[in-house]
Amino acid sequence: MKKPLSKPNIGDKIQLLVNRKTEKGILLESYDSSVVLIKLDNGYNIAFKKSEITELKVLEKRKEKTLPEKEKSMTTGQKPLIDFYITGGTISSKLDPATGAAKWLIDSQQLFDIYPDIFKTVDVKIIRPFMKASENMSFNDWATLAKKIKKSLNDPQVKGVVVTHGWENLISR
């Protein structure tokens, strides 16, 4: 008789006993209620039928990210101001360890945490006109972006513009 499975949360590090073999990984969200999906240490995801799991242990609970007491400032008024357009693509995302998927950066603090050197030499104003994967970009998106960049370049306070997007769009088309 199988032991009842413990109740881990998405992002917890777990250990499974499946067909007398031990597997460890980070629990991922599964869209199939009959399987347990985990991310292995090698980066691959693997699914196991719940009916074949004889034991499930939580090895480590997911650590919730806490926000700093004082938010880091992106602008000081002392350095040149750059309008920084985040539009999607790989460079505008980060790995979500809870799901194993890439997720869009949601705020300027996340950009600061990933690319802190940018903020050492310039003040940065983050602009997110849209967030799209490279393969979903259209001519209308590029036209929208061009109009917004023109506005930035006509602003006397703005000394430069940076536009980030995944490289796949430039290479594949």
Image: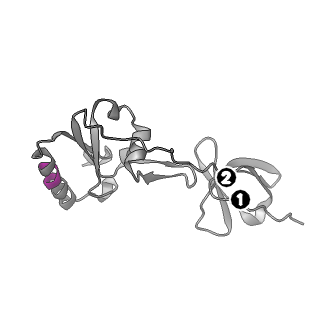
Mark seen at residue 12: 2
Q: Secondary structure at mark 1?
A: loop
Asked if the residue under mark 2 is in contact with the one under mark 1, i.e. CB atoms within 8 Å, the reply is yes
Which of the pair 55/11 is nearer the observer?
Answer: 11
On the image, the x and y values in percent for residue 89 come to 35, 50
**Residue 53 occupies quadrant:** bottom right
Amino acid at the residue labelled 1: Pro
Could you tell me what secondary structure mostly forms the magenta stretch? helix
On the image, the x and y values in percent for residue 121 come to 29, 29
Could you classify mark 2 by the number of other residues whose Cα lies within 10 Å: few (under 14), some (14-19), or many (20 or more)?
A: many
Kindly identify the residue that appears in the image at 37 percent across and 47 percent down: 108
Could you classify mark 1 by the number of other residues whose Cα lies within 10 Å: few (under 14), some (14-19), or many (20 or more)?
A: some
On the image, the x and y values in percent for residue 21 come to 79, 49
Q: What residue is disc 1 on?
A: 8
Kindly identify the residue that appears in the image at 15 percent across and 57 percent down: 143
Q: Secondary structure at mark 2?
A: loop
Residue 96 lies within the magenta run:
no
Q: Is residue 34 above or below residue 18?
A: below
- The segment highlighted magenta reads 146-150
